[in-house]
Image (cartoon, rainbow, N blue to C red):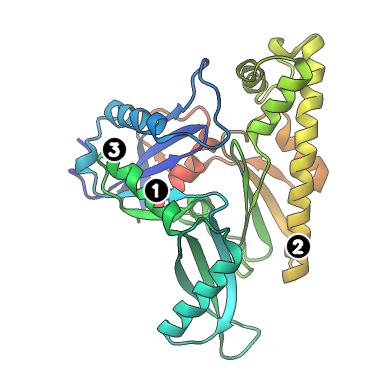
């Protein structure tokens, strides 16, 4: 039963479309994936909720997933989950070298600039990355902020399932951590991760020497499905099935004939919108940092394998694009995931426990 081995960790990703759980175990200097599970929050007859899944949907599903994995929630010792969305900000900033109390106050004021108000106070955490190489008496700080209400809603959900809240990370850092725990960032240039979820895409820029950058883009798999539904005049669940069936192969039997071309046109519209926002972010990053050498773009998340998306981005940006497999760095002690890209955040969270 999980909880009896102190070297095991659970990464829990509660998304807007599905819940992902990854169980990792450290073996020497390596990590082994002992088990994983991904379950959608909505069935064929359950309408998708654009405001996010309600607790009455999440809690029973999470109970069932833990039971399926033979996990007693009250015995879990190393749980790492995450919060995300518009009420979370991740930002690398430069500031004067201050004593801890003054730094806390300065970062609190900085956090308020980046978070929409929800009637509760901001809470922050940060890590000092080191001296600013460009200016004396200044330091680089990675700041994470959210609102107390958003954070406590997450903690209360875990407690309702019987889980003891452990470390709580944020989505962009979880994605980055899935890569950097076992792989060194490039000495020159940066890597871009596009975590394409249902309602949004996390854009993360990572390099050894360069500014860490994260931004949420309001385009995701939901928008692809909505366009397909409108173009073909079919229901959202039917459109979702067509989209999923095209993943990795836009010429499947389901897409041939009259509907296939409409599907590809619909997808291209969302692709263009997403690409335009990615381009805007990259241009901003280059302007702010002077770093224009992008080595590779990695696609992660549940919508990463939409047919032709990787080649579309590669043609658009003239940069190598790869569907990210976070399990490449892990030993497998279980069945290999059929869609590993959607487990990137959960893997990064489990690794964060180390």
Q: Which residue is mark 2?
A: 284
Q: Residue 314: which disc?
A: none
Task: Please name the residue that numbered disc 1 is placed on.
Answer: 153
Please, what secondary structure does the residue beneath circle 2 have? Answer: helix
Q: Earlier in the sequence, mark 3 or mark 1?
A: 1
Occupied quadrant, residue 133: bottom right
Residue 279 visible from this viewpoint: yes
**23 lies left or right of 307:** left
Q: Is residue 281 above or below residue 315?
A: below
Residue 279 in the image: x percent, y percent? 78, 52
Q: Nearer the viewer, residue 123 or 251?
A: 123
Give the residue at mark 3.
161
| Residue 292 can be seen in this image | no
Seen in the picture, residue 325 relative to 258 is either above or below; the reply is below
Rendered residue at 75%/49% (across/down): 277
> Farthest residue in the front direction?
119
Task: Name which residue lies at 52% across and 50% down.
Answer: 175
């Amino acid at each position: 039963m999980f909880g009896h081995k102190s070297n095991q960790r659970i990464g829990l990703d509660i998304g807007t479309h599905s819940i992902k759980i990854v169980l990792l175990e450290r073996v020497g200097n390596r990590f082994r994936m002992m088990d994983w599970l991904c379950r959608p929050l909505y069935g064929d007859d359950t309408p998708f909720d654009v405001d996010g899944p309600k607790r009455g949907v999440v809690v029973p599903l999470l109970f069932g997933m833990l039971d399926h994995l033979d996990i007693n929630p009250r015995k879990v010792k190393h749980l790492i989950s995450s919060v995300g969305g518009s009420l979370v900000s991740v930002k690398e900033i430069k500031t004067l070298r201050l004593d801890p109390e003054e730094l806390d106050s300065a970062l609190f004021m900085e956090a308020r600039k980046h978070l929409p108000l929800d009637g509760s106070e901001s809470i922050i955490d940060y890590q000092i990355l080191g001296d600013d190489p460009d200016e004396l008496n200044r330091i680089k700080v990675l700041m994470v902020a959210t609102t107390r209400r958003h954070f406590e809603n997450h903690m209360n959900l875990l407690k309702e399932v019987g889980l003891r809240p452990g470390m709580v990370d944020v989505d962009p850092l979880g994605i980055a951590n899935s890569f950097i725990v076992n792989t060194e960032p490039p000495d020159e240039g940066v890597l871009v991760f596009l975590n394409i979820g249902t309602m949004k895409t996390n854009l993360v820029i990572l390099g050894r020497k360069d500014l860490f950058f994260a931004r949420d883009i309001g385009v995701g798999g939901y928008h692809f499905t909505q366009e397909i539904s409108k173009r073909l005049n079919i229901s959202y669940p039917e459109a979702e099935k067509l989209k999923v069936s095209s993943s990795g192969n836009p010429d499947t039997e389901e897409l041939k004939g009259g509907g296939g071309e409409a599907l590809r046109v619909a997808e291209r519209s969302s692709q263009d919108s997403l690409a335009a926002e990615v381009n805007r972010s990259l241009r901003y990053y280059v302007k702010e940092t002077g770093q224009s050498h992008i080595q590779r773009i990695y696609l992660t998340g549940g919508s990463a394998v939409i047919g032709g998306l990787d080649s579309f981005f590669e043609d658009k940006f003239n940069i190598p694009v790869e569907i990210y497999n976070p399990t490449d760095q892990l030993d497998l002690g279980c069945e290999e995931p059929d869609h590993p890209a959607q487990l990137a955040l959960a893997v990064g969270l489990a690794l964060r426990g180390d």
